[in-house]
Amino acid sequence: MSEKQDELTHFISYLQNERHYSDLTISSYQTDLLEAKKFWQNNGGFDGWKNVQERDIQIYLQNLADRKLARSSQARQMSSLHSFFRFLTRRKFIQIDPTQGIALRRGEKKLPEFFYENELKQVFDSLKGNQPLTVRNLALFELFYATGMRVSEVSNLTLHQIDLNLQTILVHGKGNKDRYVAFDDHTKKSLVKYLEDARPNLLKNDAEQHVFLSNLGKPLSKRGIEYVMQKTFNQAGISGKVHPHELRHTFATAMLNNGADLRSVQELLGHSSLSATQIYTHVTMAHLKSDYEKYFPRNKES
């Protein structure tokens, strides 16, 4: 194994064994770093990670901006480079971190997208009937809405994590962090119907423990969930592109709008810092302001 490969291999091993990141997260880091390496190889040469300078990082970031990549993608690439070179510095592979003086210009922070209650009712009402996939989809979207779970957490959910009596789920979250979430009676009813009536009809292997299954009896993947949601919501009359994360946003916004404490919502969402949860207060304030401007009598005077 060459020295160049060895530095990246050390980093990947660190993410796996010390940080306990998921395979998907590790793959994203690796893809970002190899993409940067390929750029440098094609534009003046790459002489090993130890020889990357601050100017090389700046040129690469300018290339990302020139390609009109989304700011979130640019930020992710920068974050991957920063994490990697900080690791190399701490482990004494290099003396100076070439990313330490570089920061992306902050763009305007987008408020999270969410669904209105009547839109979700429209979707839930469209999922009537006893077809196994219809019953599965209702349980799936009820669960997203009632718990605020991430799509990866729902995709990886297994039977033993659900306690139907206590109406709680033990969620295995990001960074190997576990938390409990609760669910309501509507969700329990949908889950019980799916687990007792529909899932057995989808099951092909009795040893399969994943909760949500495809029509082939395999665990429903993240991509599979995204596809099912897009198709179901569009058929129910919700136009445009949708994503399961918007159901997470909807859960958080609904909780805060109905008086939940910010810390409680942070716990339920599995956010490591309160600042990540605070974005939802901006959502609720934005809509309060919109309603105020729309309905307060004096705003109609002109």
Image (spheres, rainbow, N blue to C red):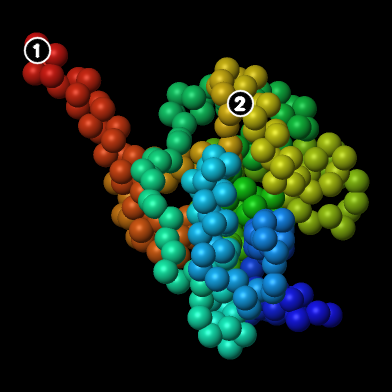
Q: Is residue 129 above or below residue 140?
A: above
Position of the C terminus, as image quadrant, is top left
Quadrant position of residue 131 = top right
Q: Amino acid at mark 1?
A: Glu
Residue holding disc 2: 233
Indicate which disc, 1 or 2, sits on the residue closer to the N terminus: 2
Residue 293 on image: x %, y %: 19, 24
Residue 138 horizontal/vertical position (percent): 64, 33
Residue at 54% over, 63% down: 57
Query: Between residues 162 and 85, which one lies in front from this camera angle?
Result: 85
- Residue highlighted by disc 1: 301
Mark 1 neighbour density, 10 Å: few (under 14) some (14–19) many (20 or more): few
Residue placed at 38% from the left, 51% from the top? 106
The numbered disc on residue 19 is none
**Residue at the front extreme?**
44
State the image coordinates of residue 193 (x, y, percent, origin top left).
Answer: 69, 38
In the displayed structure, does residue 272 sit left or right of residue 20? Answer: left
